[in-house]
Image (cartoon, rainbow, N blue to C red):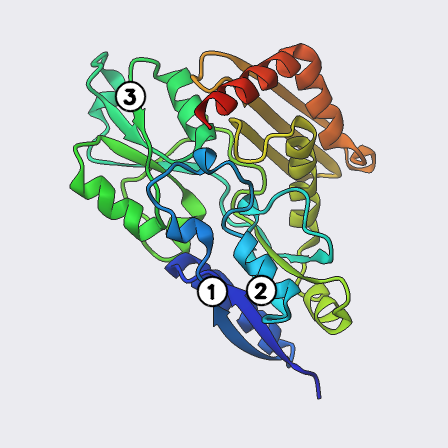
Amino acid sequence: MGKIIRIGTRESELALWQAKTVQSKLEDLGCDTILVPITSTGDQILDKPLYELGVTGIFTKTLDIALLKGQIDIAVHSMKDVPTQLPKGIVQAAVLERADTEDILVHKGIDFLSSDSENITIATGSLRRKAQWLHRYPHHSVVDLRGNVNTRLLKLIENDWQGAVFAKAGLQRIKLLPKDALDLDWMVPAPAQGAMMVVTTNSDDYCKEALSKINHTATEVETQIEREFLRTLEGGCTAPIGAIAKLQDQSVYFKGCLFSLDGKEKIEVEKTIPEKEISGFGQRCANEVLDSGGNILMQHIRDENSAVH
């Protein structure tokens, strides 16, 4: 008889959906589980943009502490929220099959996209989304939008904004995706967007063994490349960095980008290689960006962030 696996999760509707998905998969394997909701720092501080808080992993830190203290056995995260460097003693134990990776625009009518009006306001709490939007629509204004998915949708209704950008997967999972939402197929997603990561402690062999059975190998490989690209650029959540990798027909396609904070500068890499050559692929793509002016751009971003703090 195995132990009861205590599943740590944030308390938002989306986080609970993710945790219950993992719970269901583990219970299908015969494991006993219980959910342990925990309020994260990122959920508590809603009056500042993420990048102004000056930390990476703000949504995962509280769960990591609970894990290391032995209050929970595993934690379920949106993988794009997880820092590329996990805390000492914590390991990635499973990555679930990825949902849609796209960003979408939830809007009040899209006529404004074809107009030259400067009285257009789009909301997002993401530097990556903001930079890419301003790169495409430099005459628009972008305002900060924080909170869980439900809160952000409500704020869009309450404010005089034309639209807000969301991850498609998040709205799909909790059945809040509007039928007229616009797919932003030109926007490069966050590294690991649409994927869920489950972590445990390195010493917990029981949980590592159980979680290995629900790991999705293709998603694990794709997200590893994307996060390697992010880690090499040293972006965390303080730089506008996008990355997407796709395994297809024994090859891997990759597209990655780095933008200036105002969206005016863009450095992009796009290539396809044989699957057998993927070792270090994300790092090589990041180095290509850095050698193409990314080093200078990242320094400018660090300087601008330092000025904010």
Q: Residues within 10 Å of mark 2 (few under 14, many from 20)?
A: some
Q: Which residue is mark 1?
A: 38
Q: Which residue is mark 3?
A: 141
What's under tag 3, amino acid-wise? Ser
Nearest-to-viewer mark from 3 and 2: 2
Please, what secondary structure does the residue beneath circle 3 have? strand
Tell me if residue 1 can be seen: yes
Tell me, for residue 66, which label it has, or none.
2
Estimate the spatial distance between the alpha carbons at disc 3 and disc 2, rounded to whole Å.
39 Å
Rendered residue at 70%/84% (across/down): 2
Please, what secondary structure does the residue beneath circle 1 have? loop
Which numbered disc, 1 or 3, marks the residue that appears first in the sequence? 1
Q: Are marks 1 and 2 in contact (CB under 8 Å)?
A: yes
What's under tag 2, amino acid-wise? Ala
What's under tag 1, amino acid-wise? Ile
Give residue 90's quadrant in the image. Answer: bottom right
